[in-house]
Amino acid sequence: MDLNQWIGIIVMTLALLTAIVLLGSIYKVVKKNRGLDERNQLIRTRATSESGQFTLIGIIILLAITPFVEGLTVKIVLSSLLGVYLLSWTVFVIYFSKKI
């Protein structure tokens, strides 16, 4: 392995450790401010359900267009589905936060 690969491994490891520390501290602050109540759980459960339906629609669309598009790789398909899931989940969390 050359120097660039080692640098990449070190940077990814530090990023993962930083994310774990930040998520832990954010969780403590949210729990202290009573942000983890039943309303929050209902919003996230409903958003997960709805975004799963959008992801299923995305899978059907991608399966339908795959024979007609050259160069459609697994990486592109999975990235698209992840983007659809995360975007729809975020939109539904915001929507249900305003609605409930």
Image (spheres, rainbow, N blue to C red):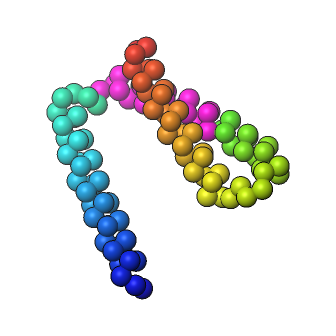
**For the image shown, how many numbered marks are present on the structure?**
0
Q: Residue at x 61, y 38 (%)?
A: 55
Q: Is residue 12 left or right of residue 60?
A: left
- On screen, residue 86 above or below 92: below
Task: Give the extent of the magenta segment.
Answer: 37-55
> Is residue 30 located in the magenta-colored stretch of the structure?
no
Q: Is residue 68 above or below residue 89?
A: below
Choose between 87 and 27: the one closer to the eye. Answer: 87
Q: Position of residue 40 (x, y in %)?
A: 35, 26
Image quadrant where one finds the N terminus? bottom left
Quadrant housing residue 83: top right
| Residue 61 % position (x, y) | 73, 40
**Residue 70: horizontal and vertical position, in percent?**
78, 56
Above or below, 7 relative to 74 = below
Give the residue at the far top of this rendering.
99
Task: Say which residue appears at 18% left-offset and 37% top-offset.
Answer: 29
Taking the magenta stretch, the answer to whether it contains residue 50 is yes
- Considering the whole magenta stretch, tell me its main secondary structure: helix
**Front-lying residue, 100 or 4:** 4
- Residue 48 visible: no
Q: Which residue: 20% across, 45% down?
A: 25
The x and y percentages for residue 35 are: 26, 28
Name the residue: 78% across, 51% down.
69
Q: Is residue 23 left or right of residue 93?
A: left
| Figure quadrant of the C terminus | top left
Q: Can residue 28 be seen in the rendering of this structure?
A: yes
- Extreme residue in the right direction: 68
